[in-house]
Amino acid sequence: MAFGPGGMLAALPDRYSVTSVAFGPGGMLAVGDLGDGARVWDTTTKRVATTPAAPHVTLTSVAFGPDATLAVSFADGQVYLWHLSP
């Protein structure tokens, strides 16, 4: 894999099919998938920053609030709000 200018920046592993991603402030990346729920990655360290306690459902969308201390996801007719530590 070519990393760097003009190439791929990172490859973050996920065991299930990803259904939604959202970039947040400070290099955070929220990922929703078909099996594990949600994860928030720190794109500078390329490590999982937090895994919100989520039911094992298919998340169809994820998003950050303006200051990245709140995340929202949608799955199976429910909207879930997550408080993320700053």
Image: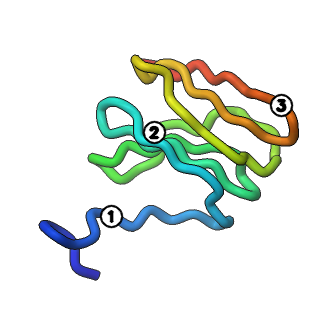
Badge 3 amino acid = Gln
Earlier residue among tags 3 and 2 = 2
Earlier residue among tags 3 and 1 = 1
Camera-near label (3 vs 1) is 3
The structure residue drawn at horizontal position 63% and vertical position 48%, both measured from the top left corner, is: 32
* Image location (x, y in percent) of residue 73: 67, 34
Badge 1 amino acid = Ala
* Residue corresponding to mark 3: 78
* Residue corresponding to mark 2: 49
The quarter of the picture where the N terminus appears is bottom left
Q: In this view, does 58 lie above or below 3?
A: above
The one of 80 and 42 positioned closer to us in this rendering = 80
The quarter of the picture where the C terminus appears is top left
The one of 20 and 38 positioned closer to us in this rendering = 20
Circle 3 residues within 10 Å: few <14, some 14–19, many ≥20: few
Instruction: For mark 2, give the secondary structure.
Output: strand
The structure residue drawn at horizontal position 57% and vertical position 27%, both measured from the top left corner, is: 71
Camera-near label (3 vs 2) is 3
* Residue corresponding to mark 1: 10
Picture quarter containing residue 80? top right
